[in-house]
Amino acid sequence: NAGVTQTPKFRILKIGQSMTLQCTQDMNHNYMYWYRQDPGMGLKLIYYSVGAGITDKGEVPNGYNVSRSTTEDFPLRLELAAPSQTSVYFCASSSTNRDGYTFGSGTRLTVV
Amino acid sequence: KNEVEQSPQNLTAQEGEFITINCSYSVGISALHWLQQHPGGGIVSLFMLSSGKKKHGRLIATINIQEKHSSLHITASHPRDSAVYICAVSKDSNYQLIWGAGTKLIIKP
């Protein structure tokens, strides 16, 4: 069982560059989430999706975009990377909002 | 005041001790989650509770809906239990999790 797979695990970006963080789950979960975790802090929700074709903003959406064309995939796009986006990014999924979450292993992003 | 409060913030104990981490919340919830974040950064969901008590191995989680309080207990603690333990709640009204600040647990051999 792969669960939630995130790629890449590490990335260094220059200011102004763009990139896509990939997230795939094989559990047929409807709900998917993107979180960021800054050093020593809790997780903050960036975007979430309750099913294919449906996405919505979380607590900190500025500077990011998402899409959900399939149940399995929920990529996070960073446009015009800024140093403030240096963080660890976690993708997660759940069957419903009342079920336990499965997290990916995280992507450590540094913007220089 | 934060909607989810955890205590203690930090906890150091000797191997074998019984550990209790507390979580209080102030909002209506549909579920409460306990998660573990390892020193390497990975996050694992331990429990999802909406009532009563759940047990998995040496871990026990309880919730009192009336008092808006949950506890996570670890019996016969071991150094490999060293991690940050996070309480999070799913609000009745939306899909977002509200996260506690976490409890950093260190178990010394």
Image (spheres, coloured by chain):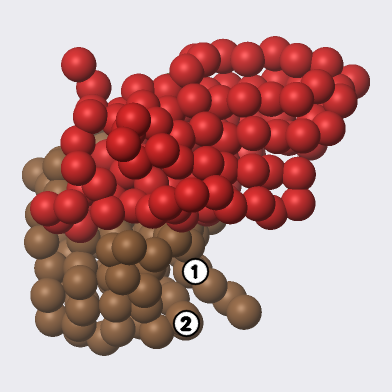
Nearest to the observer: residue B42 or residue B51: B51
Q: Secondary structure at mark 2?
A: loop
Left or right, A67 with respect to A3, comes to left
Report the chain shown in brown. A
Chain of the residue under the numbered disc 1 shown in the image? A
Q: In which quadrant of the rendered image does the N terminus of chain A lie? A: bottom right
* Placement of B89 over or under A65, stated as above or below: above
Disc ID at residue A5: 1
Point 58% across, 76% down: residue: A2
Point 65% across, 51% down: residue: B55
Disc ID at residue B67: none
Residues marked 2 and 1 touching at CB (< 8 Å): yes
Left or right, A79 with respect to B52, comes to left
For mark 2, what is the residue?
A26
Left or right, A50 with respect to A99, comes to left
Nearest to the observer: residue A95 or residue A3: A95
Q: Secondary structure at mark 1?
A: strand
Point 53% across, 72% down: residue: A3
Chain of the residue under the numbered disc 2 shown in the image? A
Residue B53 lies, in percent from the top left, at 55, 49
Report the chain shown in red. B
Disc 1 marks a residue whose amino acid type is Thr
Left or right, A104 with respect to A77, comes to right
